[in-house]
Amino acid sequence: MKRHDQVADAFGSMAPAYLTSQVHASGADLQNLAAWVTRMRTSAERVVAIRSMWMGAPDEVRQYFGMQNDCSFALDALMVEGVRVG
């Protein structure tokens, strides 16, 4: 199933009667951990905890998020704009 089909399914079959939507962006955006924690203003002790969590994550989790050796990861992202009909 295509990602856009999944999004349409999430809104339900009656959605077109009261909502129009447009997908503006989608896909897996690779996040560099260093840039991400800086942008989020994460404290140093929390950065240590995040790195520890990623390094100890099961292989299935590391694979799903596409984790790199520097703890960069891929995050599923979707931006949808909904506009009320009428």
Image (cartoon, grey):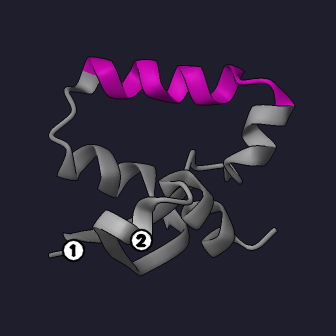
Mark 2 / mark 1, whichever is N-terminal: 2
Residues shaded magenta: 45-59
Relative to residue 44, is residue 69 drawn left or right? right
The amino acid on which the numbered mark 1 sits, given as a three-letter code, is: Val
Q: Which residue is mark 2?
A: 16
Question: Could you say whether the residue bearing mark 2 is in a helix, strand or loop?
Answer: helix
Residue 14's label in the rendered image is none
At x 42%, y 79%, the residue is: 25
Q: Quick check: 50 left or right of 72?
A: left
* Mark 1 neighbour class, 10 Å CA radius: few under 14, some 14 to 19, many 20 or more: few
Location of the N terminus by quadrant is: bottom right
Residue for badge 1:
85
**Residue type for callout 2:** Pro
Q: Is disc 1 placed on a helix, strand or loop?
A: loop
For the stretch drawn in magenta, what is the main secondary structure? helix
Q: Answer yes or no: is residue 31 visible.
A: no
